[in-house]
Image (cartoon, rainbow, N blue to C red):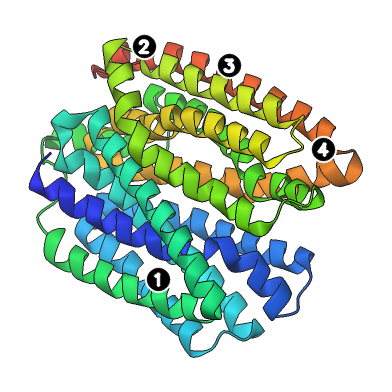
């Protein structure tokens, strides 16, 4: 891998490690320490995700307009200031305000990071996005493990720990990201043409939107592990310590097993469509298996199956976006993909909670399987649209 990519990987680890100090404890902090209801906590999390959607779109636009270096430093600066605000004052009014701003700042960073991966190692293809995905999950594993230790000592210190990591992340980005940009291979005619089509549904945009529909549904299912399934585990008297262990195993397994999964994909020459379908199949198997779970060992097995599926699906989507994107709109396409993931994370708790409150967990699992089957259909439809992209826009894509 090129040296530039290593800077991006280190930056992603620092970014996600910092975020992982906060997200496992947000609901607990709002409910237990700030004395607000779970409904209010869910509302703040929703606003945080909504701010992230706007941040994703702005981050993609900033990347295309000013380059990844300036867009990432902008996102880090906003995130840094919001975390600094949380360190200084994390009473209810300030916490809710700064937490929403935090979602906006983090949202700006992610699409630029993914867009820069393609620019730093264009010949790497899937390997580049697999590497950044592994780095992201290494950050999750480190952050959740260290965050639990810090929170157990004093939960207020998680803000200071996050701030320290973002200072280091800012320095890494400031010194290491400057020369990473998008190759200037688009001539004036192509720029003028793509500019006229910027807000139209070209074949590549249609293919991207279809993939994003599948992505939203997959995330909607995945986020149940942080909401309804987590609540069900508590109802079964499986403690928070064991639940936290699931996510540590999730991150560690991805770091250790992703090279094996990547080798299998190359060995059997799986297309992007097959990679998506294969991963979603594991999502379905995990959902069906967990629907009957009553012991921790069954939830652990379900998480392992889910993680295998995640290793196929999550790296595939930004790779597809990078292949579909015109050279002058890489940031915008990555922004749309990251927004789709954020929408899934935002709607998942609302839909899951409504289904459980109205019916029960068994009905929810049936609904989740239906969502995943629909996402499979979207994945198949993507391949047909991608073939049209090859014909009409004279670009090469892996379907």
As drawn, the label of residue 387 is 2
Q: Residue at x 54, y 62 (%)?
A: 23
Give the residue at mark 1: 79
Question: Which of the two marks, 2 or 3, is nearer to us in this view?
Answer: 3
Give the residue at mark 4: 361
**Labelled pair 1, 2 in contact (Cβ < 8 Å):** no
100, above or below 375, in the image: below
Q: CA distance from mark 2 to mark 3?
A: 16 Å
Is the N terminus in the top left, top right, bottom left or bottom right quadrant? top left
Give the residue at mark 3: 377
Query: Which circle's residue, 3 or 1, is located before the other in the chain?
Result: 1
Q: Secondary structure at mark 1?
A: helix
**Labelled pair 2, 3 in contact (Cβ < 8 Å):** no
Residue 235: x percent and y percent? 81, 50
Q: Residue at x 9, y 55 (%)?
A: 179
Q: CA distance from mark 1 to mark 2?
A: 40 Å
Q: Residue at x 33, y 76 (%)?
A: 164
**Labelled pair 2, 4 in contact (Cβ < 8 Å):** no
Question: Which of the two marks, 2 or 4, is nearer to us in this view?
Answer: 4
As drawn, the label of residue 22 is none
Where, by quadrant of the figure, is residue 184 drawn?
top left
Q: Secondary structure at mark 3?
A: helix
Q: Is residue 333 visible?
A: no
120, above or below 176, in the image: above
Residue 69: x percent and y percent? 20, 59
Is the C terminus in the top left, top right, bottom left or bottom right quadrant? top left
Q: Residues within 10 Å of mark 4 (few under 14, many from 20)?
A: some
Residue 203: x percent and y percent? 40, 22
Q: Secondary structure at mark 2?
A: helix
Query: Which circle's residue, 1 or 2, is located before the other in the chain?
Result: 1
């Amino acid at each position: 891998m090129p040296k530039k990519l290593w800077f991006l990987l280190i930056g992603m680890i620092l970014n996600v490690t910092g975020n992982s100090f906060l997200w496992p404890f947000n609901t607990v902090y709002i409910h237990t320490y700030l004395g607000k209801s779970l409904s209010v906590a869910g509302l703040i999390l929703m606003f945080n995700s909504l701010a992230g959607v706007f941040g994703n779109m702005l981050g993609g636009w900033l990347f295309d307009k000013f380059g990844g270096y300036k867009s990432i430093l902008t996102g880090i600066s906003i995130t840094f200031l919001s975390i600094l605000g949380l360190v200084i004052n994390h009473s209810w009014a300030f916490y809710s305000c700064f937490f929403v701003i935090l979602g906006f700042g983090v949202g700006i960073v992610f699409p630029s990071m993914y867009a820069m991966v393609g620019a730093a190692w264009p010949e790497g293809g899937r390997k580049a996005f697999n590497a950044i995905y592994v780095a992201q999950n290494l950050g999750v594993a480190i952050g959740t493990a260290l965050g639990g230790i810090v929170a157990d000592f004093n939960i207020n210190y998680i803000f200071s720990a996050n701030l320290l990591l973002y200072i280091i992340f800012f320095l890494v980005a400031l010194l290491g990201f400057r020369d990473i940009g998008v190759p200037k291979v688009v001539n004036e005619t192509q720029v003028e043409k793509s500019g006229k089509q910027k807000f139209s549904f070209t074949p590549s945009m249609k293919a991207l939107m279809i993939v994003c529909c599948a992505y939203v549904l997959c995330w909607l299912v995945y986020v149940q592990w942080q909401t309804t399934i987590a609540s069900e585990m508590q109802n079964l008297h499986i403690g928070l310590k064991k639940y936290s262990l699931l996510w540590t195993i999730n991150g560690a397994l991805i770091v250790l097993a992703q090279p094996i999964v990547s080798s299998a994909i190359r060995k059997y020459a799986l297309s992007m469509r097959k990679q998506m379908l294969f991963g979603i199949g594991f999502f379905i198997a995990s959902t069906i298996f967990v629907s009957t779970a009553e012991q921790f060992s069954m939830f652990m097995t379900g998480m392992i199956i889910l993680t295998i599926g995640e290793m196929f699906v999550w790296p595939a989507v930004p790779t597809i976006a990078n292949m579909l994107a015109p050279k002058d709109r890489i940031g915008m396409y990555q922004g749309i993909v990251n927004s789709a993931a954020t929408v899934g994370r935002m709607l998942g708790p609302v839909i899951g909670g409504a289904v459980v409150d109205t019916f029960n967990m068994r009905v929810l699992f049936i609904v989740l399987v239906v969502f995943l089957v629909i996402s499979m259909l979207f994945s198949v439809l993507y391949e047909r649209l991608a073939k049209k992209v090859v014909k009409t826009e004279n670009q090469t894509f892996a379907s």
